[in-house]
Image (spheres, rainbow, N blue to C red):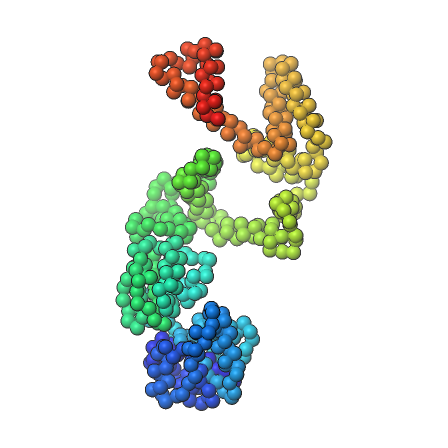
Amino acid sequence: MLTVVAMGLNKDDLTIKGLNVLKNVDVVIVKSERTHMSETLKEQGIEYISCDDLYDKAEDFLELDKLIVKRLNQQQGNIAFCIVGSGTDDSTVDYLKQHNVPFETVYGVSAEQYVNPVCDSNGVRVFTAQQFVDCTNVTAVATVVKYIDDSYIASDVKLKLQSCFDYDNAITVYDGRLYQSTLDELDRLDYNHLTTIYIRPNADYSKRKVFDFKDVMDVMHILRSPNGCPWDREQTHESIRKNVIEESYELAQAIEDNDIDNMVEELGDMLMQIAFHIEIARDDSEFTAEDVYTALCRKLVDRHPHVFGEVQAVNSQQSLDSWEKIKAQQHKIKNLTENLRDIPKGMSALMRCNKAQYRAGKQGYDFVNLQQVEDSLLSELNELKNAPEDCRQEEGGDLLFSVVNLLRWYGVDAETALLTSTEKFINRVIAVEKKLEPTGKKLKELTPEQFDLLWAEVKKEMQ
């Protein structure tokens, strides 16, 4: 029978139950005698076998666990395996569980026990150093990281913490003594098997340098609170509706300009709009942030069965087809009519036109070839030329519709194309006007020939 005996972090942490087990088994094996465990066992007159020689043979921790378990299995009779900590956070114990090796556990004092006096009372996340380095969900909440036993793992932990904590954030360190340091100093401390840290974010937002999404929601909650901002408290979904559109265009412009710094700012502005609507909804008991996160993740999982399910998709078009098929099922869209009516009316005219054509085309409502598309465009141009004044708006719309259709056939997004051309036109006009500055002339004072000459010069320079 194998019993795991957790011996805490100090030589006085061995429990009475653990001591009884150690005195009544046939073999005692210690994971490493370079810890307090060897001193405790020697004081109790208990002989043991060490696994320190396996550390030198193993290339990594997985192989080390494998070699230790092999040694445990080679023993006869009742065996005690001594580890540091509480018994819930040891990699060899995890290996035993994963490989269905039967054992019992005598739990011991946890590492976090030694930093508990300074921990928040409303909950703390606890990791071993390796668990923390492997973790993908690191947030600025009160956190304990234990068993930071060398500078290499300390450096990895520090790098991960700096993604959501300030470099000078205070940390509490326990390595047999309890003292204060800073995150910046974490990879320059003295380390042993006891080394455990506790960190929590600065509660004063005005002094913080690094924030995460949780902080965004907390700040927005403060702004909407009775002691917050009067303007923010007055806003409704309707009053800030247009802001979402404006911020979207500003983000699109930053992307078009390849302005990375501005992209960071505009993405933040977009995120603020999301947080604002969530906070308004929470105040009005409409929905919660968790409802939004759940709806998004549910959609992403459900609409990617080629990632989270059994469906196969070998290219992006098959992925898109799968997405649209599932979307239609979820929106209970039974036919083309319902699919077209599902297109938001708040979209820009070009985007809505393109989406309507695309959806209709997927159901067979489209031209047979590109020549028919081009012929249709020329026909609509003719109709506009010959249209009476009261019909020009309608015929002009038909012409634009045909242009969007032609661009769609060429694989060009009409909205992006027009935005790009408009920006190009503006920049060229600005350049022409700049060339006129030394002469003192205005654009409207130029003859057509003079303007054409300047325009051709600017076009050549800006190619």
**Front position in the image: 461 or 390:** 461
Q: Residue at x 60, y 37 (%)?
A: 343
Q: Residue 158: x, y in percent?
A: 36, 59
Q: In this picture, is 120 found above or below 280?
A: below
Q: In this picture, is 275 found above or below 74?
A: above
Q: Residue at x 45, y 37 (%)?
A: 258
**Front position in the image: 428 or 2:** 428
Residue 142 visible, this angle: no
Q: Residue 35 appears in which quarter of the rendering?
A: bottom left
Counting the numbered discs, the total is: 0
Residue 46 visible, this angle: yes
Q: Residue 357: x, y in percent?
A: 64, 33
* Direction front: furthest residue: 57
**Front position in the image: 20 or 448:** 448
Q: Residue 111 appears in which quarter of the rendering?
A: bottom left
Q: Residue at x 45, y 49 (%)?
A: 282
Q: In this picture, is 30 found above or below 137?
A: below
